[in-house]
Image (spheres, helix red, strand yellow):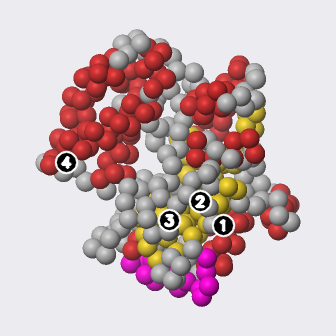
Amino acid sequence: MIARQLDLRTREKHAQEAEAGHMQPNPADGVTYEIGSLVKWPETERFSDIVQRAGYHGHLKMTFLPKTKLHGSNVGLHVMPDGSLQVQKRTAMLTDNEDLHDVRSWAASLKVLPGARPVILYGEWCGPGINKGEAVQRIPGKTLFLFAALVDDTLVYKPYSLQKLVTETFAPAEQNPVVIADNLPPVTFDLQDEEQLQKQFSTLVDEVEEASRVDRFIKEHYGIKGTGEGFVFFPHSANILSSWRRYLFKVKCKRHAETKKRKRIKPKKPLGIDSFLDEHLTENRMNKILAEQFDGIADKHHMGKVLGAIMSDLKKETVNEMERAAFEWKDVHRYASPRIKTWFFPMTK
């Protein structure tokens, strides 16, 4: 179970496997990137989309590695060839005149070791004043919690490898990035038994809900007892790891869920446009877009851009449901627009 803490011997086994070379980095899905330019971390999808994609490509089984999902701001830290640092938020590189919750001033305090390899470190920038309501907001200071990295066109996502990378990159310091090291066991799904798959995923959603009542990672590292957001599942088996960007999925607790039918693998045909939008155009979804793409600021002059961003996300995330319901996008757009405006304009006053 996600909520169950692994015993010490299991954790030692993971570390031994890592040292023996069984937890090596994996190819970066054929993606080329340039240090110092925006390289967006891919969107994590719903499990139903992952199952459909896997079935299309003939995958009968899939294994994933779960990691705690912290409620912060997505950040990429670029270690340049000359040892300098640059920072990206989800949508753009931060310029000299920009900052995001003081992340650039924090980055300036880091000391890169001579000869450190160029790398992009991906993590959640969390702490006091960044979002609200979870245990991680009560830690002593703002911190970058790492969940992955790209180095030499290679994805690094396993905790031991990430920690090794941090040690090789930065001089020892209290403010260095912290690796999300849950050491949770991998989870395998068998796509050949649809009924059992649905039961397994329903159980997983219940376990995530229970585990999120107390964020175990934050409690273990800071002694702070409080709620968490959920978990992200990284592709772990070879058949999907080669296409890792298309096989990341998340399971959030009920408080953060962007759809009300969290346990459903196959989309159910909506009764009508209103019920469709009730299910998928949630405040959580709209708040997420506002936070990620507009730094949480509801500026009436950006209404058009906010509307377009939410519509784009809604369309991308509900392709299967719209097809099943025989809805045309123009109809969804027509009825979604007033709802978005009703949600947005009161925040601009």
Disc 2: which residue: 147
CA gap between label 2 and label 3 equals 20 Å
Amino acid under disc 1: Leu
First in sequence, mark 4 or 1: give its number: 1
Find residue 120 and report its horizontal and vertical position in percent.
54, 67
Disc 3: which residue: 34
Amino acid under disc 2: Phe
Disc 4: which residue: 302
First in sequence, mark 4 or 2: give its number: 2
Mark 4 secondary-structure assignment: helix
Mark 3 secondary-structure assignment: loop
Q: Is residue 174 visible in the rendered structure shown here?
A: no
Say which quarter of the image contains residue 142.
bottom left
Mark 2 secondary-structure assignment: strand
- Residue 290 marker: none
Q: Residue at x 55, y 58 (%)?
A: 32
CA gap between label 1 and label 2 equals 8 Å
Find residue 241 and report its horizontal and vertical position in percent.
69, 47
Q: Are marks 1 and 2 in contact (CB under 8 Å)?
A: yes
Disc 1: which residue: 162
The stretch in magenta equals 105-117
First in sequence, mark 2 or 3: give its number: 3
First in sequence, mark 1 or 3: give its number: 3
- Near mark 1 (Cα within 10 A), the count class, few <14, some 14-19 or many ≥20, is many
CA gap between label 4 and label 2 equals 32 Å
Position of 343 relative to 104 (above/below): above
- Near mark 2 (Cα within 10 A), the count class, few <14, some 14-19 or many ≥20, is many
Amino acid under disc 3: Glu
Q: Residue at x 19, y 43 (%)?
A: 303
Task: Give the prevailing secondary structure in the magenta stretch.
Answer: loop
- Viewer-nearest of labels 4 and 3? 3
